[in-house]
Image (tube, grey):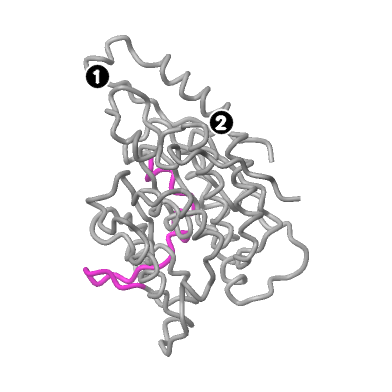
Amino acid sequence: MALKIQRPKAKDQNAQTDNNSIAMSKRTTIGLALSGGAARGIAHVGVLLALAEHKIPIDCIAGTSAGSLVGGSLASGLPLAEIEAIGRSLRWRDIGRMTMSRLGVQSNERLEHYLRARLPVTRFEDLGIPFAAVATDLNSGEPVVLQKGDVPFAIRASCAIPGWYVPVTHEDGRQLVDGGLVAMVPSSVVRSMGAEIVLAVDVNAQGATFVGPSRSVISIVLQSMLVVQRTASRHQLEAADLVIKPRVGHIRWDEMARADELIAAGYEAGVESIPVILALLEAAAQARPRWYKLRRRKKISAKRPLTLPM
């Protein structure tokens, strides 16, 4: 039975943007790392609803693939109600279309147009919350952290699933594909953006608990990527102070029509994380030296991440 979500009040839906105006020297800064996960990424919306409801401020965001879509939307100032509506209505046809290219089955240029028509801000320099989208350089295999220029383009590049979507060509000539190949959960990127507390959301933590084989080509491609990434992403998870794990292992990566369940699962995991987040904030406040008001800051090192029971 789907969880009934208590909606945050309208004034709380933009809490992240409002709190971003608070000087960072006055409190501990919180960053959000949103994992890739295709359709499962819709669960990120539920986590955001829970954080906003409990007035947890977000100072910076990094997202990979589906996480970049949700994180970029929040950073642009799009109200949570609208982000939720997009999550419930988005379909694969809104993201890609068939192409004659030898480099992929589809082009995901349609996603870029979709976002450009909806985001209130489309330049990184104008975002209300600092944001980074993580992609992969197809030739070098290195991560590419996109933080300048056009936001819809960056999200499109981060979501370019290799083998399915045609690689996206950057203005410098590099071919970019899905960031999940190198940083499924971009915790270290968030840490580098200045966050003292890093909250990671991993929608793939449960793996695949659904019954039966994958039923589409894109589902097979996604599952193959995640198998390879499971070990590689361990150090990214260790860079987070808390890993929030929505219980969505029973949902396939291509099942966008199950948005209600995904959002409910994300919300439930988000609410469960609140006591731990408050404890992290309290510990960080206690760790500050008494002279921090003089704008000298004590950096809190990354520790082994706390995880909630699944």
Q: Provide the residue designation for mark 1.
A: 296
Up/down of 199 relative to 70, above or below: above
Residue 75: horizontal and vertical position, in percent? 36, 48
Q: Say which amino acid is labelled 1.
A: Arg
From the viewer's perspective, is 292 left or right of 183? left
From the viewer's perspective, is 150 left or right of 11? left
> In the figure, residue 212 lies in which quadrant?
bottom right
Q: Say which amino acid is labelled 2.
A: Ile
Of badges 1 and 2, the one in the foreground is: 2
Binning the other alpha carbons within 10 Å of mark 2 as few (below 14), some (14 to 19) or many (20 upward) gives some
* Residue stretch rendered in magenta on the structure: 168-190
Q: Provide the residue designation for mark 2.
A: 274
> In the figure, residue 91 lies in which quadrant?
bottom right
Up/down of 40 relative to 285, above or below: below
Q: Give 280 or 109, whichever is nearer the viewer.
A: 109
Mark closest to the chain's N terminus, 1 or 2: 2
In magenta stretch: residue 169: yes
> In the figure, residue 30 lies in which quadrant?
top left
Up/down of 6 relative to 98, above or below: above
Mark 1: secondary structure: loop
Q: Residue at x 60, y 77 (%)?
A: 217
Mark 2: secondary structure: helix
